[in-house]
């Protein structure tokens, strides 16, 4: 099974900062990599799919990149609404199975 | 727009079976997509439990496979989760969601506590 490791686990940042979260896979796979934002008491919200495709309605300050075993989520200029927990998720079409990273909490510095 | 809603008991005794149902509106389950269950223990991350394809094929997380059953009732446009032999470690918010490679629409989540 592919394991997904996110870093950092917690990130302290200020409004306006550029923020980068990394997701590493234990083995190379296709670009079926998604990013979610979750706020307390709410279901996760899909931000990016297929590694770099922004879901309709998601602000353009969010972007995704990567391939193989390393993927990144970047917030170009952190806004107050962006303080939340972010998860990556990999899809293995061979099985099929879905695997989440352990999450990265973005907190106020 | 696709909407999903979880329902079921909020409290289950240890060693019993946890049962949840997800009711889908705005889309026919038999028309497409995977329909899955994800859980989140309090203060922890997300764990995929299993998914059923619209054709009826079912896929489980290997770590839970021995205790999980997912089924679908197309007449009610619902799919269900059963998790047997539960322990306190199964206490979590359980989400239902639809997906292809990623989970696009989610239910609001149902907190299930395992306690005597």
Image: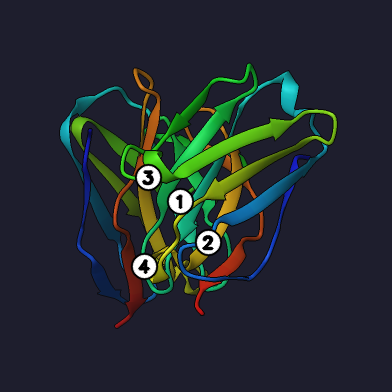
Q: Is residue B5 left or right of residue B88?
A: right
Q: Which secondary structure lies at badge 3?
A: loop
Residue A16 vertical position relative to residue B46 in the rendered view, above or below = below
Q: Residue at x 23, y 66 (%)?
A: A9
Q: Which mark is residue B44?
A: 4
Q: Nearer the viewer, residue B115 or A76?
A: B115
Residue A63 in the image: state x and y as whole percent. 39, 44
The colour scheme applied to this rendered structure is: rainbow
Q: Is residue A13 above or below residue B69?
A: below
Tell whether label 4 touches label 1 (CB within 8 Å).
no
CB atoms of marks 1 and 3 within 8 Å: no
Within the image, what quadrant is residue B79 found in? top right
- Mark toward the start of the polypeptide (3 vs 2): 2
Tell me whether the residue at label 1 lies in contact with that at label 2, contact meaning CB atoms closer than 8 angstroms.
Answer: no
Kindly report the distance in space between the C-alpha atoms of the residues bearing marks 4 and 3.
17 Å
Residue at point 29% right, 57% down? A102
Q: Which residue is mark 3?
A: B64
Q: Position of residue A42 (x, y in %)?
A: 58, 66
Q: Nearer the viewer, residue A101 or A81?
A: A101
Q: Marks 3 and 2, Cα distance to the nearest angstrom?
A: 15 Å
Precedes in sequence: disc 4 or disc 2: 2
In 3D space, how far apart are the residues under numbered discs 1 and 3 (Cα atoms)? 23 Å
| Callout 2: SS | loop
Q: Residue at x 48, y 66 (%)?
A: B92
Disc ID at residue B16: 2
Q: Chain of mark 2?
A: B
Q: Earlier in the sequence, mark 4 or mark 3?
A: 4
């Amino acid at each position: 099974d592919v394991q997904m490791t996110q870093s950092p686990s917690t990130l302290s940042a200020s409004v306006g900062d550029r923020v980068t979260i990394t997701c590493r896979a234990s083995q190379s796979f296709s670009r079926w990599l998604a990013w979610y934002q979750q706020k307390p008491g709410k279901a996760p919200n899909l931000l990016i799919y297929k590694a770099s495709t922004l879901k309709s309605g998601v602000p353009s300050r969010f972007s995704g990149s990567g391939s193989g075993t390393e993927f990144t989520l970047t917030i170009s200029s952190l806004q107050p609404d962006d303080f939340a927990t972010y998860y990556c998720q990999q899809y293995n079409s061979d099985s099929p199975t879905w695997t989440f990273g352990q999450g990265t909490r973005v907190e106020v510095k | 727009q696709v909407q999903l809603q979880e329902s079921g008991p909020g409290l289950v005794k240890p060693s019993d079976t946890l049962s949840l149902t997800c009711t889908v509106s705005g889309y026919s389950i038999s028309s497409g997509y995977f329909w899955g269950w994800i859980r989140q223990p309090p203060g922890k991350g997300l764990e995929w439990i299993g998914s059923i394809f619209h054709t009826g094929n079912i896929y489980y997380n290997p770590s839970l496979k021995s205790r999980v059953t997912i089924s679908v009732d197309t007449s009610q446009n619902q799919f269900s989760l059963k998790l047997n032999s539960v322990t306190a470690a199964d206490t979590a918010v359980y989400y239902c969601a639809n997906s292809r490679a990623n989970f696009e629409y989610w239910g609001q989540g149902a907190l299930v506590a395992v306690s005597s």
